[in-house]
Image: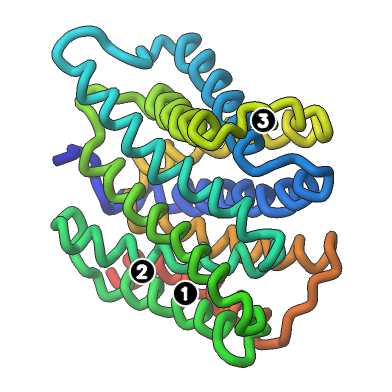
């Protein structure tokens, strides 16, 4: 069991909220950048591999500068490798590869919508493994965010047509993997693990899984296609590296359930960029749902303080 606190100290409430908004916003930027890369003709697996490998290399360099060992020698080596493999699969490889496959069908905004589900899934998993105690304020805020999500994905929420139901079902792999990753990283956080080093290992672990997929499918030959959008690839690498420095700091400060709300923020950013950059149109129910989601985030952020 991790020694991390799953409830943010009151003195860190402002830091937790700032990190939540920054990380969620940066993840939201992934949706339009990925869509631009698709439009340029970059295939999904090379894109995901370059993003994870490049960001992992940057984070590994940063960890070295900060004096954080990426892989300590001794009896903990196996535990760290297992952590990198599992967290890399759940938090990086699965969500990002699935995102690239479903986005051409669902669009940037609706691909982002499924990121509203990790908070409630994370809460359920965290309670199940007893690293989170149900708190009325936090549960109410997360359920309010879920209500906003249901407004978005409901019958009047401009969901894809029925013939795209299969792609929408595949998209739900993303929140399930993200939620499982949120809980796993807390439960399995290795002794002495430092955030930047663990972020680097997780990113490189994700790159390893995607490399296996590249080799298994013969898509290695598609790697040169990254040259179709080199500046977008570099932008995505830089954004991803910054995102996961802040992401693991948020995990330490606030715990897995609070962190999972980044999906709400990312969804709102995804909807906004889908509208402004790609001309995607959503009903008033979608925008109303986004407003309800924001209220839910604020309730989880400050509800405990107000209840005292």
Q: Of helix, strand and loop, which one carries label 3?
A: helix
Work out whether residue 180 can be spotted: yes
Q: Nearer the viewer, mark 2 or mark 1?
A: 2
Q: Decide: few, some or many residues near mark 2? Use Cα within 10 Å; few <14, some 14-19, many ≥20.
A: many
Applied colour scheme: rainbow
Q: Which mark is residue 145?
A: 1
Vertical placement of residue 203 versus 141, above or below = above
> Alpha carbon of mark 3 to alpha carbon of mark 2: how far?
30 Å
Element class at badge 1: helix
Residue highlighted by disc 3: 238
Q: Position of residue 211 (x, y in %)?
A: 51, 29
Which residue occupies 63% across, 80% down?
163
Q: For the N terminus, which image quadrant?
A: top left
Separation of marks 3 and 1 at Cα, in angstroms: 29 Å
Determine which quarter of the picture holds residue 286.
Answer: bottom right
Q: Identify which residue is drawn at 24% across, 8% down.
A: 73
Residue 199: tell me if it is visible: no
Q: CA distance from mark 2 to mark 1?
A: 9 Å
User: Could you tell which of marks 3 and 1 lies nearer the N-terminus?
Assistant: 1
Within 10 Å of the Cα at label 1, are there few (<14), some (14-19), or many (20+) other Cα atoms? Answer: many
Q: Quadrant of the C terminus?
A: bottom left
Residue 2 image position (x, y, % from top left):
19, 39
Label 2's element? Answer: helix
Determine contact: label 2, label 1, CB under 8 Å: yes
**Horizontally, is 148 left or right of 129 in the view?**
right
- Which label's residue is closer to the chain start, 3 or 2? 2
Q: Which residue is mark 2?
A: 120
Q: Are marks 3 and 2 in contact (CB under 8 Å)?
A: no
């Amino acid at each position: 069991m991790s020694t991390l606190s799953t409830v943010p100290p009151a003195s860190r409430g402002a830091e937790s909220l700032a990190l939540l908004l920054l990380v969620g916003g940066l993840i939201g930027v992934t949706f339009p950048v990925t869509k631009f890369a698709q439009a340029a003709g970059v295939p999904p697996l090379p894109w995901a591999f370059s993003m994870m490998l490049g960001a992992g290399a940057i984070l590994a360099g940063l960890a070295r500068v900060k004096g954080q060992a990426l892989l300590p020698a001794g009896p903990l080596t196996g535990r760290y490798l297992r952590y990198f493999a599992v967290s890399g699969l759940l938090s990086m490889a699965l969500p990002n590869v699935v995102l690239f496959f479903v986005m051409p069908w669902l669009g940037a905004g609706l691909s982002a919508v499924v990121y509203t589900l990790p908070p409630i899934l994370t809460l359920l998993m965290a309670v199940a493994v007893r690293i989170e105690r149900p708190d009325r304020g936090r549960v109410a805020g997360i359920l309010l965010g879920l209500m906003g999500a249901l407004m978005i994905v409901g019958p009047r929420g401009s969901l894809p047509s029925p013939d795209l139901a299969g792609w929408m079902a595949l998209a739900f792999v993303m929140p399930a993997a993200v939620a499982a990753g949120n809980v796993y990283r807390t439960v399995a956080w290795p002794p002495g693990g430092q955030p930047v080093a663990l972020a680097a290992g997780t990113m490189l672990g994700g790159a390893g899984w995607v490399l296996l997929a590249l080799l298994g499918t013969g898509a290695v030959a598609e790697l040169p296609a990254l040259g179709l959008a080199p500046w977008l690839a570099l932008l995505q690498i830089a954004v991803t590296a910054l995102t996961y420095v802040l992401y693991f700091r948020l995990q330490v400060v606030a715990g897995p359930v609070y962190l999972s709300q980044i999906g709400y923020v990312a969804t709102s950013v995804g909807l906004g960029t889908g509208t402004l950059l790609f001309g995607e149109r959503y009903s008033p129910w979608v925008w109303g749902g986004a407003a309800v989601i924001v209220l839910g985030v604020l309730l989880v952020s400050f509800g405990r303080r107000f209840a005292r």
